Image: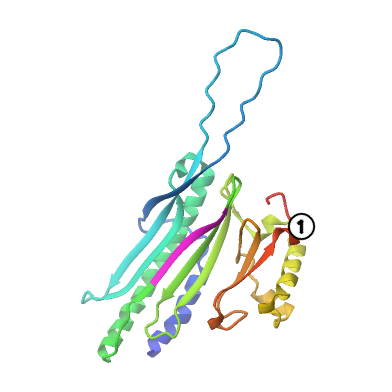
Amino acid sequence: MNIRSARLFPLMLALVLALSACTSGGPSNTRTPAASSTTPASPTPSSSGAPQDAAPSSPSPTPQVLTWSEQTFQRDYTAEDGTLVMSVKYVFPDVENADQNPAWSEISSYYAAEGAAYMATAGELAGYAADDYAVTKATGGEFLPFGEESGYRFSLETKDLVSVVRSYYANSVTGAAHPANYQFSEQFDLATGERLTLSSFFTDPEAARTRILETLSGKDALSGYSADTLSSEFKDEYFYLTEDGFVFYFQPDTVAPYAAGLLEFSIPYSELEDLLSPTL
């Protein structure tokens, strides 16, 4: 790996790990229907009292149906001679009928902003890719185009909330020993569109965090780490929900060597039951 490439790897990691909720805008994106789920219809009030002539009944309101779709942000970047130097494809959740519910619109906008932020970062990195190609070409080396991809999955969806797990992959340095693989996640209140934090799920967030760290320190893969080390590497935003409990994760090369990859640990809801908020 040349000196210029060696400098790109930490830059790319810093840019990606810094991406969170950003301002909306940026390039247009492709939206594709994915799935749908139905929210409960509003209850119809019952009547009481003596029988009277029946009045025409109003039709029951049509239940709102949340229809998931996708936002795809992608682009190929080329050098002046037309050679492909970088290709990116980022896929995020979207709501096809976001205009029917302000909460759904909030979720759609959140991921539109994420996609725009990723594309802005890609544009900066593409300049380095073109420079790296020029240097590699001049020295007779082999150039491999930079590449980045992201995807997502739903780990839990109820009538009240949704938990989204996102993957990120980058092979953005020619000759790098390892590609970058990271994971991110978000939880949203489907009634308000608000992004839920870890604290949202507990009546006493500090007590919950202490118990979570104590539980994690008992896991075999983390048994060699002190409570202080785990506390410093534990990020409140690195969690998602399943039907059975919380899943907490550590990015590669944090509490374990890079070769160990992403580390995930499940904690059942039952082990935190006395601290859970009504959100769950």
Main secondary-structure element of the magenta-colored stretch: strand
**Secondary structure category for the residue under label 1:** helix
Residue 53 picture location, percent across and down: 61, 7
Name the residue at 25% across, 89% down: 138
Mark 1 residue crowding within 10 angstroms, few (<14) / some (14–19) / many (20+): some
At label 1, the amino acid type is Leu
Residue 127 picture location, percent across and down: 34, 75
> Within the image, what quadrant is residue 8 found in?
bottom left
Colouring convention used in this rendered image of the protein:
rainbow
The residue lying furthest to the left in this view is 81
Residue 26 visible? The answer is no
Q: Which residue is mark 1?
A: 275
Q: Is residue 16 left or right of residue 88?
A: right
Q: Quadrant of the N terminus?
A: bottom left
Name the residue at 69% across, 59% down: 199
Q: State which region is magenta.
A: 148-156
The residue lying furthest to the bottom in this view is 139
Name the residue at 32% across, 65% down: 75
Residue 234 picture location, percent across and down: 65, 72
